[in-house]
Image: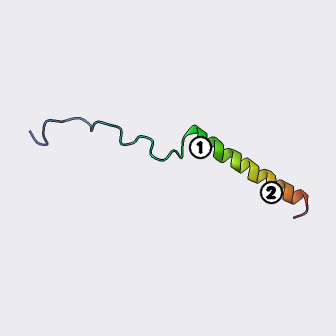
Amino acid sequence: MHGGKSTGAPTGNSSALKHGRYTTQAIDERKEVADLIRAMRDLVDQAGG
């Protein structure tokens, strides 16, 4: 047969976590930073900036 003896998908998970951008922790941290930036902008607007 063509292609050797392995007929299935490759072993191992090549789609495994590589950078962590979409972990729950990273998403929560980005939301927190966005909330802080929003709060700072509101303060600047209130101060007449």
Q: x%, y% of residue 11?
A: 28, 36
Q: CA distance from mark 1 to mark 2?
A: 23 Å
Name the amino acid, label 2. Answer: Arg
- Name of the residue lying farthest toward the left: 1
User: SS at mark 2?
Assistant: helix
Q: Is residue 43 left or right of residue 24?
A: right
- Against 9, residue 40 (above or below) is below
Q: Which comes sooner in the sequence, label 1 or label 2?
A: 1
Number of numbered discs:
2
User: SS at mark 1?
Assistant: helix
**Residue in view at x 23 percent, y 35 percent:** 8
Instruction: Tell me which corner region of the image, top left, top right, bottom left or bottom right, holds residue 46.
Output: bottom right
- Against 16, residue 42 (above or below) is below
Residue underneath mark 1: 26
Q: Is residue 49 left or right of residue 1?
A: right
Q: x%, y% of residue 9?
A: 27, 37
- Name of the residue lying farthest toward the bottom: 49
Question: Which quadrant, please, contains the C terminus?
Answer: bottom right
Q: Is residue 15 left or right of residue 7?
A: right
User: Nearer the observer, disc 1 or disc 2?
Assistant: 1
Task: Give me the disc on residue 41.
Answer: 2
Q: x%, y% of residue 27?
A: 61, 43
Name the amino acid, label 1. Answer: Ala
**Residue in view at x 86 percent, y 59 percent:** 45
**Residue in view at x 60 percent, y 39 percent:** 25
Task: Give me the disc on residue 15.
Answer: none
Instruction: Tell me which corner region of the image, top left, top right, bottom left or bottom right, holds residue 47.
Output: bottom right
